[in-house]
Amino acid sequence: VWDMNAFNGLGKQEVTYSGIGESRSYNGLNFGETVTVEQEDFTTLIDRRRAYEVYAKGVGMVYKVQRDLKYKFGSPKPIKGEEYFYEVVNFGVQ
């Protein structure tokens, strides 16, 4: 566990690692070793917040999810919020 904002003026945000060394594929690109940085996973009956990034060895960030959704109590469909998904499409050296 570490504070990803330790070296900036933003508030403390503790994150953890998961899936260390897992193989993953995105858009037909295969990555032999990845790690997931878990930033937030919070769920209640009216909120769903999820944020994580996947990094590949020798490449950098290859996938990211940022989700902040609000629900009416008891409903499975969100009534408002935002979801962002970022996925690698290509990489290399210039």
Image (spheres, rainbow, N blue to C red):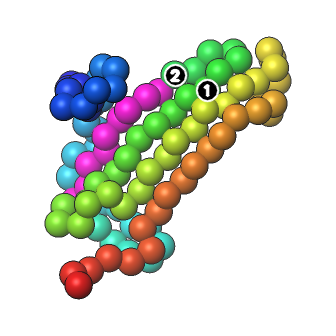
Which quadrant is home to the N terminus? top left
Q: Is residue 65 left or right of residue 8?
A: right
Q: Which mark is residue 42?
A: 2
Q: Is residue 40 left or right of residue 66?
A: left
Q: Which mark is residue 48?
A: 1
- Mark 2 crowdedness (10 Å alpha carbons): few <14, some 14-19, many ≥20: few
Residue 46 image offset from top left, x and y in percent: 70, 17
Identify the secondary structure beneath mark 1: strand
Q: Which residues are magenta?
A: 33-41
Which quadrant is home to the C terminus? bottom left
Residue at the (62%, 44%) spot, across then down = 83
Q: Are marks 2 and 1 in contact (CB under 8 Å)?
A: yes
Q: CA distance from mark 2 to mark 1?
A: 6 Å
Let me know if residue 80 is in the magenta part.
no
Residue at the (43%, 28%) spot, across then down = 40
Identify the secondary structure beneath mark 2: strand
Q: Which badge, 2 or 1, comes first in the chain's sequence?
A: 2
Residue at the (44%, 74%) spot, across then down = 89
Residue 85 image offset from top left, x and y in percent: 54, 53
